[in-house]
Every structure is written in structure tokens, then in C-alpha cells.
Image (spheres, grey):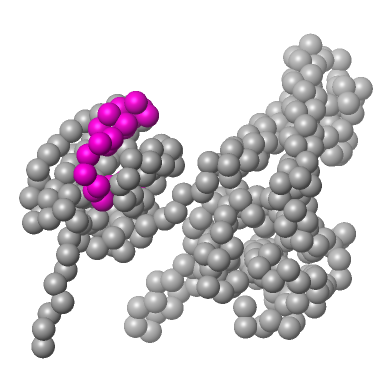
Amino acid sequence: MQTKRVRFPKITIGVDLGDRQSVICEIDRKGAVVGRSTIRTAKASVREYFAGRERSRVVLEAGTHSPWFAREVEAHGHEVIVANPGRIYGARRRKNDPKDAEFLARQGRADVTLLHPISHRSSEAQKELAMIRARDQLVGARTKLINHVRGAVKAQGGRLRKCSAEAFATRATSELPEETRAALIPLLDIIAGMTATIRQYDQQIEKLVATSYPEAARLMQPKGVGALTALAFLLLVGDPTRFSHSRDAGPYFGLIPKLDDSGESQPQLRISKAGDELGRRLLVSAAQYILGPFGPDCDLRRHGLKIAARGGKNAKKRAAVAVARKLAVLLHKLWVSGAEYDPDWVLKHRAV
């Protein structure tokens, strides 16, 4: 029986990306180290190092700088493999930048599947996601300030009435105890400004959906899924054909339990929380609306309520996560099929 000969790349380059400097290790087809370098993590330095040289396989790990770095290297004709750092470093005990660069190069030379490679989003999708993430940071900061104001008022023996975050600054201004006004009025002004900026972000998102992402309207058919969740889902998934089956959308957002089966032991573990945290949080938030008092009567809601009715610790949280997973599958199905939303969809697709 003749053994198939493995053809390794002529040169494989491992890059350990740093915030200011990146460490490079080059190995040849035989696995020998033929070069080590350090370059600035800047576009000019990347062009200087990679432009004009023979096509090579370049391996780097996903991180803050990896999207633009990968695009820059690919522009000079090289093959780029972006490794998933969460999947490749678990068993290593001795780590530093030169060792990491050599490790990436050797893994990329031998078998790229060992790197669990990922695909970066387009620069356009990254730009739109940057706006969504900026809005999310602003919402989080506003929530912290609102909680601080409420706590400061309670410390003086007072209490502010419940209201929405959007109305908080206006409502609280007239309810603040006199002894807290000098300290808290400036914070209320900041909260009001944050609310106005968040409203501007929402208008931009709605405009994007209407002008650039019409398919998002299809994803907004289930009540509880707004423009923000629909657009974020589209941008985070990127290419709907990346999933062989719509049911793969749940694991992509980390909405399935971890696995640690061994022999007779099959422990019930928490969800994996893989993938994008913001996307997962938006799906869970939509699921909580569906399960809440204003949620529509649909099979997604009935599915979640059955899980919650079983009782036990964190039953409501488990129900929300279960509905979020089904919702992710549903949104992908609506996206790829172009079908109209059916409120009894879960009932008809028990396999997912």
C-alpha cells in the first residue's frame, strides 16, 4: 500500500501579535527554524515585512489586531490562517512570545485543522458592529450611573420611583431629596445626554436595516426581535451558509451545555458561552421578552414556559436560554429560507 506524501508549505510564518510589537518565527518545509524577527504592530511594518516576498502560509491567532493584520498580509498574496486561541493553548505550560510564534508556525505547517481556524468578518461588518458595541457600552454605563443615583438616594432615607431608563433623568430630577441634589444633578445631566446618544444610535441602526440590510426585516417577524437584535445577528453570523444546518446557530452563540462525559459520568454543565457575548445576550434578552408578560402566544413561548414550570434552581434562566437557542435557529432558518414566520415553528421542528 502506497502512503500518500504530505506536501508541506515551503515557508510557514507564525506571528504572535502584540499590541505594539509582534514576534515572528519562520520555519521551512523540513520543520527547521530559518528566521526570527520582531516588527511593530502597524500597517507600514507589515507591508515592509511581507510585501514582495514569495507566497507563504502565515499563521496568527485571533485578537484585537488580527482582522486588519490578516487583510494586510492577504493583500500581498500570502495564505493566512487565523487560529482560535481558546482551542489551541489549553495543554501548554511554557508560553512566551517567541515560543508562541514558533508553536503557531509548526501547527500551521503540519495541519491547519489543529488551529481550529476562524474567518474574520468583512471591514464593513466590523464598522457596523463597532457602532452596535459602542451603543452597548453606553447602555451599560448608563445603567451603572442610574444604580448609583438610586443607591445614593436610599442612603439618605429616600427612594426613587420605578421608571424606564429613558425617563429616569427627567423623573429623578423632580424627586431627588434636597440634600443630594448638588451631588446628583450633574450625574442626571450625564444620564440624559447618554439617553439622547443611545437614541441616535438606535436611529442609525434602524436606518441601516432599512437601507443596507433589508434581510434583517425578515428576522424581525417574531415579536421581541427588534432592529438591534436582527442586525447584530446578521453581522455576527456574516455568511448564512457557514452553517450546514440551522441548528448549528445555537452552539455558535454558546447556547448549548458544555460536554464532559466520561464513562458513566454525564454531569449537567453550564452553557458553553462560546462565540460572541453581545450576540448571546441580545438573543437571551429577546427570549426573556417572549417569556414575559407581554410576550406573544407562540410555540417558542410555550416551549419556554414548560421548562420553567419544571421548577428547580434557576428554572427561569434555563427556560430563557432554551428559548434563545431555539430563537437563534429560527432566525437563521428565516434568513436562508425567506419564509414567513410561523408562530408554531418550534412545534413543527422538534428535531432542532
Locate residue 72: give its quadrant.
top left
- Please state if 187 lies on the left or on the right of 121 as rendered: right
- Please state if 85 lies on the left or on the right of 64 as rendered: left
Q: Which quarter of the image is occupied by the C terminus?
A: bottom right
Q: Residue 331's spot in the image, x, y percent? A: 69, 64
Q: Nearer the viewer, residue 24 or 178?
A: 24
Locate residue 326: give its quadrant.
bottom right
Q: Residue 184's spot in the image, x, y percent? A: 77, 18
Q: Residue at x 67, y 36 (%)?
A: 135
Q: Nearer the viewer, residue 145 or 229?
A: 229
Residue 328, can we see it? Answer: yes
- Please state if 293 lies on the left or on the right of 143 as rendered: right
Q: Residue at x 51, y 48 (%)?
A: 121
Q: Which residues are magenta?
A: 41-61
Q: Which quarter of the image is occupied by the N terminus?
A: bottom left
Q: Is residue 265 above or below residue 180?
A: below
